[in-house]
Amino acid sequence: MKIDRRRMLKTALATAALAPLATLRTQASTPRLATRKVASINEHIPVIGLGSWITFNVGSDPRLLNESAAVIAAFLAGGGRVIDSSPMYGSSQATIGYALRKLGNPPAVFSADKVWTSQSDGSSQIAQSQDRWGVRRFDLLQVHNLLNWREHLDTLRGMKAAGQLRSIGITTSHGSRHRLLEEIMAREPIDFIQVTYNIADREVEQRILPLAREKGISVIVNRPFRRGALIKELESKPLPNWVSETGATSWAQFLLKFVISHPVVTCAIPATTRVDHVKENLAAGAGFLPEESLRTRMAEYVRRL
Amino acid sequence: MLDRADYTLSDFLLFSARVYYRTLELHNAALWPLHVLALVAGACIVLCLLRPTLLGMRFSYALLAVAWLFVAWTFFLDRYATINWAAAYLAPAIGAQGLLLGIMAIKLKATNLTYSGNARRTLAIGLVVFSLIGYPLLAFAFGRPWHAAELFGIAPDPTATATLAVLALGRGILAVLAAIVPVVWIIITSLTLHTLGAVDFFVPALLALASAVAAYAQSRARNIISDPASR
């Protein structure tokens, strides 16, 4: 076939016209990180967040600070937004602040922290936390493990009313003090709760999650891996031969998909020190999320192992 | 298989093994070459124990006092507190231990010291020598970076074990009081190391137990300090 200039130009123009369609097809085949709505602030947040208990408590070690910054960078690059911390977590707040400054204070971050003091006035601790993060205003402040909850909820409500805070919440972990948490959820206007929920610890399914749905309270889940213990227990065991139905390709994703596929869960916050793990976690929040019958099969499979 | 998620010790630990040993590395890097001075101080203590005099034992207690005060300030307040907020609350107790040993250095009398037999004296000296030389080698023995080696007078664990060994040759209420902080610290560090998964978590406790054997195995003891001024 004789190649002339006219034919070449026609081919080049046709290729250029089709290129955007090829890009669209690539984007369509890469699932996006799912989001859930936070009713109180009318905003969607990704279902996979990033915890910081233990993992970001690295003191002033430059090497570990930079490694933590790399994890946060990968998290944000992968579409993550919610980062959760607490004054109880050692130097984790300062590590997050270091990372955010290094990354140019990305505006997409949904900053979730806690007030944790037996003193009735938590405002100086909150100010210190803001300073460590390098944020002017937290997206979410939570009363940590119900400590002094009455006084601190008053403080947080005052801050929210003054525009110094976007949303307020309350946390517990290890399945403790659920009765008190229920009472608070029923009586107090709060935007978030944070509870322990995973494929082995499902107590919150009975009363806490239904109550959250009823009250329009968003739910953050801590310990989705029981601080790694679940993965350690399961990693030597085979995934089910029907795992592809869940969309998971590893035990970490299997466990995360179970958690975030509960319709009342807003976000899970696994913590990690590794970039590859944060990417793996984010991938669990994209694509297919199991429905109720598949979730039941997943839980039963793990229970029998 | 999967039991209820109750609290365990690891839920109260704020840091990982990775961070703990990096903290020791950074601590050593920041203080080098004071380790040489610490070893010389430890060697002086061993010499004082080998040829005991009242003045020598006072000097030993004074060196231990300085070691504890130094560890309280440089390790607990400056270093450990960056990853463990509880360290700032422990530092005053560690510092008080230094002050108590300083008081003992001043107030020590020959009647406060006892050697209840060569075997027990040898055991006590051996424990001090292990705290000086053997303890840092644990890093090599258990596959940790040598920069994270723990030295007497620089890190709290060998400082505590050496102190208990010296106190094992003492008697009186002050010696008992001065053993409290090292024993409490050894309990804390043993639990911490065990929770971190350190294979050698039992070493401080074992050394403390050996010091207890040296101290209390024989209730009848003779005072053999050869210092005319003490009579």
Image (cartoon, grey):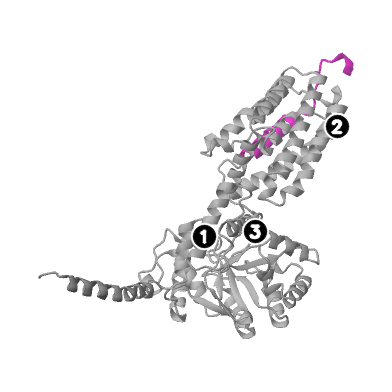
Which label's residue is closer to the chain start, 3 or 1?
Answer: 1
| Image quadrant occupied by the N terminus of chain A | bottom left
- Label 3 resides on the chain identified as A
Report crowding for label 2: few under 14, some 14 to 19, many 20 or more residues within 10 A (C-alpha): some
Which of the chains bears the disc numbered 2?
A: B
Q: Residue at x 75, y 62 (%)?
A: A125
Q: Residue flagged by tag 3: what amino acid is it?
A: Gln
Residue A191: within the magenta?
no
Q: Nearer the viewer, mark 1 or mark 2?
A: 1
Q: Residues within 10 Å of mark 3 (few under 14, many from 20)?
A: many
Per the rendering, the mark at residue A73 is: 1
In the image, which disc is placed on residue A93?
A: 3
**Residue B15: where, in percent of width, then height?**
62, 52
User: In what quadrant of the picture does the C terminus of chain A appear?
Assistant: bottom left
Q: Quadrant of residue A29?
A: bottom left
Residue range in magenta is B202-231
- Residue of label 2: B103
